[in-house]
Image (tube, helix red, strand yellow):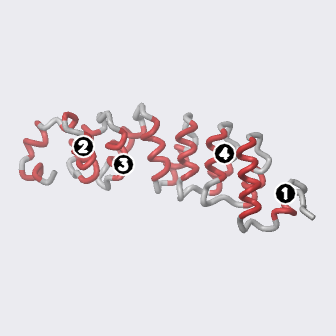
Amino acid sequence: MKKFRKYPILAETLNILDEPESVQIETAKSSEDLRMLRRLLNSPYSKVKFRLFDNPNITPEILNGLLQDDNTEVQAYIASQTNDLELLARLARHPEPQVRAFAARNYNITSELLERLVRDPDPRVRYEVLHSSKLNNDLLQILMRDPNGKIKQDALFKCRSTSFSKPEKRAKGLFRRRK
């Protein structure tokens, strides 16, 4: 896409949305042309919007366009990848459970956000909290009493099989001792 720097008229006349998905992805990843990046907000392809978010040249205007996208996969991707804690907190309150679940997967998530998400009404979100790299003993204890059987079972297994401190004492009778 470097040829557009030499020929700025081409950038104006080329309708990037008529190009194949692979060309749109490559443009979204590396273009510095803000007009081109704005056009890509209207791409029908989610992968293009994922790469658009990864582009270091996007502006707050383009980021807002991505956050307002009708496809929640785009917002979920942003929730899983962002380093911006304010944005992550905003996405952790998103009305769609898929976006909140992806926020719980984010490596940068804070313990405060996980404390809110561990009580989420949707089990998919709580399941992702269980598998967060920031899971602590207190959150695990809450998940061990989860109303969802799968989450409760996985939390008990995780408590038994990981280095969480003294699971038998902390679980208070949830485990049976074998003789």
Q: Quadrant of residue 92?
A: top right
Residue corresponding to mark 2: 24
Q: Which mark is on residue 92?
A: none
Residue at 57% x, 44% y: name it.
Answer: 101
Q: Looking at the picture, which amino acid does disc 1 mark?
A: Ala
Please state if 112 lies on the left or on the right of 67 as rendered: right
Q: For the view shown, which residue lies furthest in the front direction?
A: 179
Tag 2 near tag 4, CB within 8 Å: no
Residue corresponding to mark 1: 171
**Circle 4: element type:** helix
Q: Looking at the image, is mark 1 or mark 4 earlier in the sequence?
A: 4
Q: Looking at the picture, which amino acid does disc 2 mark?
A: Gln
Q: Which mark is on residue 53?
A: 3
**Circle 1: element type:** helix
Q: Disc 2 versus disc 4: distance between alpha carbons?
A: 35 Å
Q: Looking at the image, is mark 3 or mark 4 earlier in the sequence?
A: 3
Q: Looking at the image, is mark 1 or mark 3 earlier in the sequence?
A: 3
Q: Disc 2 versus disc 3: distance between alpha carbons?
A: 13 Å
Q: Disc 3 versus disc 4: distance between alpha carbons?
A: 26 Å
Q: For the view shown, which residue lies furthest in the right direction?
A: 179
Q: Disc 1 versus disc 4: distance between alpha carbons?
A: 19 Å
Q: Nearer the viewer, residue 119 or 45?
A: 45
Q: Residues within 10 Å of mark 1 (few under 14, many from 20)?
A: some
Please state if 111 lies on the left or on the right of 76 as rendered: right
Q: Nearer the viewer, mark 3 or mark 4?
A: 4
